[in-house]
Image (spheres, grey):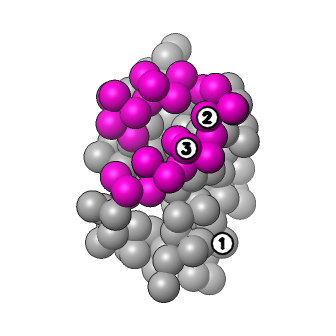
Amino acid sequence: MLKMKRAYDDISKQDGRRILVDGIWPRGISKEDLAHDEWYKSLAPSKELRQWFDHDPGKWDTFKERYFKELDGHKETLKEIKAQSAGHNVTLLYGAKDEEHNQAAAIKEYIENMD
């Protein structure tokens, strides 16, 4: 099962494999203190797209459309995550405060709609 969680939230046994999908390390957390299995910063949105979006929910649909085009270049990694989540928990970690409009939510949607 593919899940999402803020990097600042408590660790749970139900998290399973924990993958950080931010391009920037979460503020205020040391690399030793964040329990994670992988950091796929290459999956993060480009700097230009991230700055344009600026966590504005009104831009969410356009952000996802543009971001999905960027994610098209990472299909092998995304297929690997999808395969890992078949029958096992995989949690995408992110630092954003908005739990609905962030790159992890977009990645989750992208993976769930992959063939």
Q: Are marks 3 and 2 in contact (CB under 8 Å)?
A: yes
Q: Residues within 10 Å of mark 2 (few under 14, many from 20)?
A: few
The numbered disc on residue 1 is 1
Q: Which secondary structure, mark 3?
A: helix
The mark that comes first in sequence, 1 or 2, is: 1
Foreground of the two, 44 or 55: 55
On the image, the x and y values in percent for residue 36 come to 47, 46
Let me know if residue 56 is in the magenta part.
Answer: yes
Which residue appears at 62% of the width and 83% of the height?
A: 87
User: Gap in Å between the C-alphas at discs 3 and 2?
Assistant: 6 Å
User: Gap in Å between the C-alphas at discs 1 and 2?
Assistant: 28 Å
Q: Is residue 103 visible?
A: yes
Which residue appears at 44% of the width and 37% of the height?
A: 22
On the image, the x and y values in percent for residue 14 come to 71, 60
Split into 4 quadrants, where in the image is the N terminus?
A: bottom right
Say what amino acid the circle numbered 1 marks. Met
Q: Which secondary structure, mark 1?
A: loop
Say what amino acid the circle numbered 2 marks. Lys
Task: Give the main secondary structure of the magenta stretch.
Answer: helix
Q: Which secondary structure, mark 2?
A: helix
Let me know if residue 48 is in the magenta part.
Answer: yes
Residue topped by disc 3: 62
Which residue appears at 40% of the width and 33% of the height?
A: 49
* Range drawn in magenta: 45-71
38 to the left or right of 86: left
Say what amino acid the circle numbered 3 marks. Thr
